Image (tube, rainbow, N blue to C red):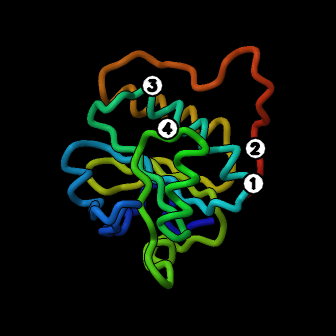
Amino acid sequence: MTTIIQGKTAPDFALPDTTGKRTSLREVLLEGPAVLAFYKVSCPVCQYTFPFIERIHKILGSERIAVLGISQDEPRDAAEFTEEYGLTFPSLVDEDGYPVSNAYGLTNVPTVLYVEPSGKTAVSFTGFDKEGLQQIADMAAKSNGKPRTPVFKPNEDVPDYKPG
């Protein structure tokens, strides 16, 4: 769960990635919408969800939509997770005491949000949510003037939901 639900403003933050380079949400939103995906490397539902988030990232390319992983782990562990799951989007690291996770009121991971350039949250869910992931892909495609692209393949056996 998160207290940042649809229609609420996403708190700004500036976090380092796994190499120490800082990224701020405010700067990212100047370029377009952002997908924020909070995770912990030891979370099995995160491990299941993140390859689908990578699919969304690949569908979108780098066109005005930022996909950001936000890890609740040490930078080295987050970097290993990124490599193990073949993630090509940046992975930021929530710092000691999890100030960003706390600002978002997180109680579980994965938590995924789609944030409009205005800072308003358009989609927010916790756990693996098949419909939520497709909704994010659809909104991102629409904001780029692209056609809808299915995230899930017809022959995949993917559950509708897995709690985080």
Mark toward the start of the polypeptide (1 vs 4): 1
Q: Is residue 79 above or below residue 13?
A: above
Mark toward the start of the polypeptide (3 vs 1): 1
- The quadrant the N terminus occupies is bottom right
Do residues under tags 2 and 1 come within 8 Å of each other at their CB atoms?
no
User: Which label lies toward us, 2 or 3?
Assistant: 3
- The quadrant the C terminus occupies is bottom right
SS for tag 4? Answer: helix
Left or right of 24? Residue 56 is: right
Measured in 3D between alpha carbons, the distance from the residue under mark 3 to the one under mark 1, in whole angstroms, is 24 Å
Q: Which residue is under mark 2?
A: 161
Give residue 107's position: percent from left, percent from top.
64, 72
Q: Which residue is under mark 3?
A: 59
Numbered tag placed on residue 136 in the rendering: 4
Do residues under tags 1 and 4 come within 8 Å of each other at their CB atoms?
no
Q: Residue at x 79, y 35 (%)?
A: 159
Q: Which residue is under mark 1?
A: 44
Circle 2: is it few (<14), some (14-19), or many (20+) Cα within 10 Å?
Answer: some
Do residues under tags 2 and 4 come within 8 Å of each other at their CB atoms?
no
- Amino acid residing under circle 1: Pro
Measured in 3D between alpha carbons, the distance from the residue under mark 4 to the one under mark 3, in whole angstroms, is 11 Å
